[in-house]
Image (cartoon, helix red, strand yellow):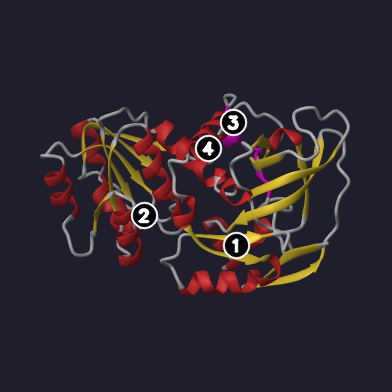
């Protein structure tokens, strides 16, 4: 069988993988499609080599078909079409408070353990969520990032009729915008890339270009000075951190979705005191977020085909990562792991 091994130094090699027979509580999958995530790009750039330990098979935004069951598995059967919630829970720690998805010892399958960029993938059975029959495996590969968006919106406690601003209209920001729309919120997106700006506008969202518009004034105009009840920072940019406290209203919420690594960025703490603002972290997802993501995907309300930039075969994966570096305006690149 084929597998794509990240070798380090911006390089994937296609090699012979191993179809692992499932042990007790495990399932072997035939991987359908796997999306390329921002985390995969960070891995490709070499910034996670100590954690990933190349050569490693990565990839975690996967849809698949159940091929083989290990002992004791009853939640799925051979032939089921599934999405994978790629979290491996370690020993509980007192700091966790029962929140397993952000526990001290949680591992991400596809980062800390072999992932989905291969024909056959063996994973714990509890990670699997059945897909409706009418949802394609291509669209099923969106369930993982859509579950991220569902979790972010849940953390933000968004209610129908609220004004919400999404800073960053990439794949996750766009999916957050769609989930907010499902909740009945007023959705505004801030996006600097002209191609993505046009796409988001064509999808029916109100979009602000913060390069050529003053974001604070634009949000004020669109909301009749009420500003945003909830802001989602998805860009990871310093400029977003600088402005996020200026666009939220009294007792508004700011949900930190992006990973702000590297040098620390100053935050206007006085604004939090003055307007009783909440800053909320949001990471990964819980089981109910997957259930909600599958329900939304099955409803047909998200035009996934318009969000797919390119579908490529597994043995073309090197070129896909090179293309992403060349085309930052792209949305979702899918790897067909069976072609």
Q: In the image, is 115 to the left or to the right of 293?
A: right
**Rendered image: mark on residue 287:** 3
Tell me which numbered mark, 3 or 4, is placed earlier along the sequence.
3
The answer for how far apart the CA atoms under marks 1 and 2 are is 22 Å
Camera-nearest label, 1 or 4: 4
List x then y, in percent, for residue 122.
79, 46
Camera-nearest label, 3 or 1: 3
List x then y, in percent, for residue 25.
82, 33
Q: In the image, is 222 to the left or to the right of 9?
A: left
Q: In the image, is 284 to the left or to the right of 245?
A: right
Q: Residue at x 52, y 46 (%)?
A: 145
Q: Is residue 103 magenta?
A: yes
Asked if disc 1 and disc 4 are in contact, CB closer than 8 Å, the reply is: no
Q: Residue at x 11, y 39 (%)?
A: 225
Tell me which numbered mark, 2 or 4, is placed earlier along the sequence.
2
Q: Quadrant of residue 23?
A: top right
- Name the residue that disc number 4 marks: 298
Tell me which numbered mark, 3 or 1, is placed earlier along the sequence.
1
Secondary structure beneath disc 1?
A: helix
Asked if disc 3 and disc 1 are in contact, CB closer than 8 Å, the reply is: no
Query: Which segment is the magenta one?
Result: 99-109
Tell me which numbered mark, 1 or 2, is placed earlier along the sequence.
1
Mark 2 is surrounded, within 10 Å at the Cα level, by few (under 14), some (14 to 19) or many (20 or more) other residues, namely many
Tell me which numbered mark, 1 or 4, is placed earlier along the sequence.
1
The answer for how far apart the CA atoms under marks 3 and 2 are is 25 Å
Most foreground residue, 172 or 95: 172
């Amino acid at each position: 069988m084929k597998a794509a091994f990240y070798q380090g130094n911006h390089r994937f090699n296609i090699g012979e993988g191993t179809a692992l027979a499932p042990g007790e509580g495990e399932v072997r999958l035939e991987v359908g499609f796997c999306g390329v995530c921002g985390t995969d790009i960070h891995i490709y750039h070499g910034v996670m080599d100590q954690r990933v330990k190349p050569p490693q098979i990565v990839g975690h935004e996967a849809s698949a078909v159940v091929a083989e069951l290990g002992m004791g598995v009853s939640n799925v059967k051979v032939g089921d079409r599934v999405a994978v919630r790629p979290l491996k829970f370690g020993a509980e720690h007192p700091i966790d408070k029962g929140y397993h998805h952000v526990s001290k010892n949680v591992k991400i399958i596809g980062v800390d353990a072999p992932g989905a960029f291969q024909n056959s993938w063996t994973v714990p059975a509890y990670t699997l969520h059945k897909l409706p029959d009418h949802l394609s495996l291509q669209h099923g590969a969106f369930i993982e990032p859509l579950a991220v968006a569902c979790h972010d919106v849940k953390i933000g406690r968004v209610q129908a009729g609220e004004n919400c601003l999404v800073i960053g209209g990439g794949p996750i920001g766009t999916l957050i915008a769609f989930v907010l729309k499902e909740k009945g919120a007023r959705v505004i997106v801030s996006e600097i890339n002209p191609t993505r700006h046009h796409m988001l506008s064509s999808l029916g969202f109100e979009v602000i270009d913060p390069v050529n518009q003053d974001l604070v004034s634009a949000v004020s105009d669109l909301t009749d000075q009420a500003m945003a009840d909830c802001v989602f920072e998805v860009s990871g940019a310093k400029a977003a951190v600088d402005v996020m406290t200026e666009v939220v209203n009294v007792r508004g919420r700011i949900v930190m979705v992006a990973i702000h690594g590297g040098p620390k960025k100053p935050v206007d703490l006085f604004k939090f005191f003055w307007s009783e603002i909440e800053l909320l972290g949001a990471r990964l997802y819980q089981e109910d977020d997957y259930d909600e993501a599958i329900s939304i995907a099955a409803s047909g309300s998200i035009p996934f085909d318009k969000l797919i930039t390119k579908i490529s075969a597994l043995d073309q994966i090197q070129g896909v990562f090179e293309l992403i570096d060349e085309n930052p305006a792209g949305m979702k690149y899918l790897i067909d792991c069976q072609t």
